[in-house]
Image: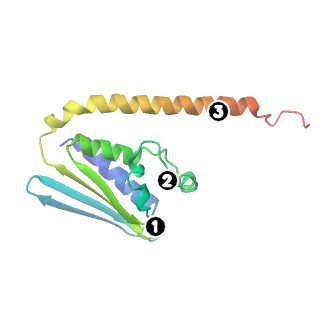
Amino acid sequence: MDKVKFKQILYNLLNNAIKFSSEGGKVNISAELKEDIVEISVKDEGIGINEADYERVFHPFVQIDESISRKHGGVGLGLALVKRFVELHGGKVWVKASPGKGSTFTFRIPKRPESQVQENISSVQTSYDLEIEREKEKNRKIKEKAEVFSMGPESPNI
């Protein structure tokens, strides 16, 4: 098991659970070892997710509710990375949630030597580097267009 990727999975799930929970809300972590499978769940008392959005939350650069993402920040890569890293380990991740009642993200991965996982990592890194570069380029172009059409504070009043 790649310890760095495993920590990143937990960090991303816990970060989202804390970020989207109301003040005073609780976040619970449970773990279970079944023979050669590890199953970990992160449960929060946050805003929840509609069932129709369960798969979408794992897509790169997806924010289910733009107003919430503006409030809390982020670009929509955390859960996409969770899914990619879990799958790299031969596992599966899923969510169960109810709007207004919180979410439970669970992942299951087999216990196995790190060397078997390392083979897949370079191809994943290249893929995400390309997606991130495309997103940066898109944002740069949008900013340039906005600057062209913006009159700015030094512009004369018309």
For the point 38% across and 48% down, which residue is it?
58
Q: Nearer the viewer, mark 2 or mark 3?
A: 2
- Rendered position, 80 above or below 64: above
Determine whether label 1 and label 3 are within 8 Å by CB. no
Instruction: Name the quarter where the C terminus is drawn.
Output: top right
For the point 42% across and 43% down, which residue is it?
77
The first of marks 2 and 1 along the sequence is 2
Q: CA distance from mark 1 to mark 3?
A: 34 Å
112 and 145: which one is in front? 145
Say which residue label 3 marks: 143
Residue 157 appears left or right of 56: right
Say which residue label 1 marks: 99
Could you tell me residue 5's position as x and y percent? 27, 42
The crowd level at tag 3 (other Cα within 10 Å; few <14, some 14-19, many 20+) is: few
Instruction: Name the quarter where the N terminus is drawn.
Output: top left
What's the residue type where badge 1 is placed?
Pro
83 and 11: which one is in front? 83
Helix, strand or loop for disc 3? helix
For the point 49% across and 50% down, which residue is it?
63
Say which residue label 2 marks: 64
What's the residue type where badge 2 is placed?
Ile
51 and 49: which one is in front? 51
Could you tell me residue 14's position as x and y percent? 36, 56
